[in-house]
Image (cartoon, rainbow, N blue to C red):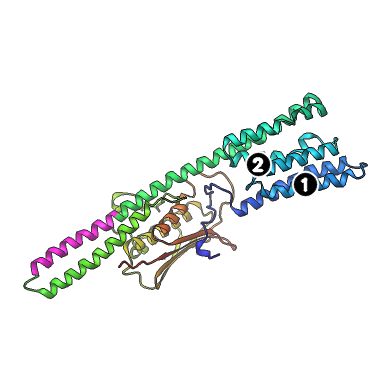
Amino acid sequence: MDRWNRQPGEARAGEARGELSARSARALWCGSAGLVLAVLGTSVLVAGTGHGRRLPVAVALVLVQACALRWQTRAPVLVLAVNALTGLAVWALLPAVSLTGALLAAQVTLCVLSATRPRRASVRALAAMCLPAPLGFHAGGSAGLAVYLLTVLLAWTAGQWRGAQQARRRAETRRAVVEERARIAREVHDVVAHTLSVMVVQAAAADDVFAQRPEQAREALRAIETGARSALGELRLLLRAFRPEAEGEGEAETVPGGGDSESDRRPGPSLARLDELADRVRATGMTVRVHREGAAEGLPAAVDLAAYRIVQEALTNTLRHADGADEVRVRVAVEGECVEVTVVDNGRTRQSGPASPGAGRGLVGMRERARLVGGSLRAGPLPGGGFEVAARLPVERVS
């Protein structure tokens, strides 16, 4: 897979996701399968001693449950049915194993189903899991019935809590992308307004000298043509910002002294002011090294602005979330038809702990910036330590 098409890596304080990634699904399977093998597998080996041929069959059923958990995020209803039936078969073969323990894999799947599927489906699954409750009463009396029902209800409730948490994160993400796109629209509007104002002045100048100095008038007309092409490109980017997307994220963050004020929204932020941005970060005690390759002059205003904002927000993330960071390297390379921006710090990434309100928004805001100009962004911790943000922004030529 092209590394530039990867989604942004996990944010330092956590990033909202609507679905489990492949790595997370694999980790969930390993954890749940390990739990089932450790708890139920041990119980089967202990309870099956002296039962001859029943023990190998029960062990095989436990292995089937552990393997079925591999697909619990894709087809939780089917996996729940498989684990419930095999669990009941284990309990029938070895009654010494409690019903709650025999159906442990089914309870794990119920939790996943409750978190990832609509409430109506999860309630039906909960009702289905309660059907074997009389067997618990038959085997362990009132205590056995209470323990079984309690564990099933706890599994369902845990899934509901997780699902509600994910829904809140998705709502926050949708709200954040609307805010980010509104900010981008304001900035592109200001760029276009500035360009059109210049065109008006040039048109008036051309009209004044059209008869006396035709060559000067032609230069003004060529400048108007160039400005019009640029304005068309910026308007196309503005429309792209509000194009419906399946998934969008982000609210921009700003470094100290670079807030979303009226002065910050006027035309001006660009790669030409990168040293000023670095100086503001250096004032906090951070070492900032800026390396440029190629000439950034003449870039489309939207691409120039997006590159600047990505660097700005990456530096903000370093200041706020990179524990122990004292140095950050910024590289801006203009190569052919694209601009590559890389920001790398030497801090420690926070791997655990509750996410603070708005945590990770700067990262998804950067992705929205890159997407707007048709580019891509990747971000994540580096194997040797530190955190990297890298964006690739194409330079579109407007015809």
- Total numbered labels: 2
> SS for tag 2?
helix
Which residue carries the number 1 mark? 37
Q: Residue at x 24, y 56 (%)?
A: 193
Question: Can residue 282 be seen here?
Answer: no
Q: Residue at x 56, y 48 (%)?
A: 19
Magenta span: 189-209
Up/down of 145 relative to 304, above or below: above
**Quadrant placement of the C terminus:** bottom left
Which residue carries the number 2 mark? 77
**Quadrant placement of the N terminus:** bottom right
Q: Is residue 171 left or right of residue 75?
A: left
Name the kind of residue labelled 1 in the image: Leu
Q: Residue furthest left?
A: 212
Q: Residue at x 8, y 66 (%)?
A: 208
The verdict on residue 201 being magenta is yes
